[in-house]
Amino acid sequence: MLKLYYFPGTCARASHIALREANAEFTLERVDFMKAAQRGDDYRRVNPKARVPALATERGILTETPAILAYVAQRYPGAELAPLDDPYEFARVQAFNNYLCATVHVAHAHGPRGTRWADDPAALAELKRKVPETMAECFALIESEFLVGPWVMGDAYTIADPYLFTIGQWLPADGVDPARFPKVQAHQGRMLERAAVQAALAAET
């Protein structure tokens, strides 16, 4: 059986939702960030990167949200979480998810995780100050160019949707008013109506 290592509110939520959308059999293992368990020896044996998510499979551990999401979509093709029969469309899904991973998540992390890039207090303060601006720029691009609607890729719900939902929930804490992005905000509302999302949120409380 699969096991998802997670902490509530982190990007692991996207993988959690996808597993529920796929009706996968899996267990949850909470990694207590409040006790820095992600940096402990036990968890580093699972994921040396000391981050979540990590997905334990029968063949080994997978890390990185885009990879885990693609794995779920391909392992459970009947759930139709990605256009697996169309290489171009599947690449478009991957491009969006990699943008969230490599650009948007990094822009967010400059606030709460600034010590990954700097030690000087003034530099850390500047990284944090910039977060509302950079996150707003990222979501303005998503709003205008990438969110086709009603789902990220158009009419079909895909693994891009739980990922956007998860990162979109960080906007208020990043000092960005979600109301600036009505398409993104409407997407959040549609996601909250889904049974898999409701179950994931309930399981993380």
Image: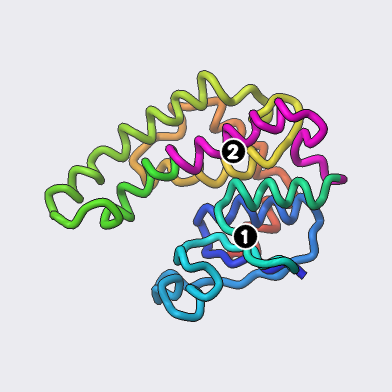
Q: Residue furthest top?
A: 144
Q: Position of residue 196 (x, y in %)?
A: 73, 52
Task: Give the image quarter of residue 54.
Answer: bottom right
Q: Residues within 10 Å of mark 1 (few under 14, many from 20)?
A: some
Q: Residues within 10 Å of mark 2 (few under 14, many from 20)?
A: some
Which region shows up in magenta? 78-103
Task: Give the image quarter of residue 39.
Answer: bottom left
Instruction: Name the disc covering residue 195, or none.
Output: none
Q: Amino acid at mark 2?
A: Gln
Magenta stretch encompasses residue 162: no
What's the distance in space between the residues labelled 2 and 1, CA to CA?
27 Å
Please give the name of the residue rendered at 45% of the width and 30% of the height, measured from the top-left corner.
139
152 vs 179, nearest the viewer? 152
Magenta stretch encompasses residue 98: yes
Q: Position of residue 51 (x, y in %)?
A: 47, 62
Look at the numbered disc 2 and give the secondary structure of its residue: helix
Q: Position of residue 43 (x, y in %)?
A: 50, 75
Q: Is residue 63 left or right of residue 41?
A: right
Q: Amino acid at mark 1?
A: Leu
Q: Position of residue 186 (x, y in %)?
A: 60, 31
Q: Which residue is mark 1?
A: 62
Q: Which residue is mark 2?
A: 188
Look at the numbered disc 1 and give the secondary structure of its residue: strand
Dominant secondary structure of the residues highlighted in magenta in the image: helix
Q: Is residue 160 above or below residue 33?
A: above
Please give the name of the residue rendered at 68% of the width and 27% of the height, measured from the top-left corner.
153
Q: Is residue 185 above or below residue 127?
A: above
Q: Is residue 163 left or right of residue 197?
A: left
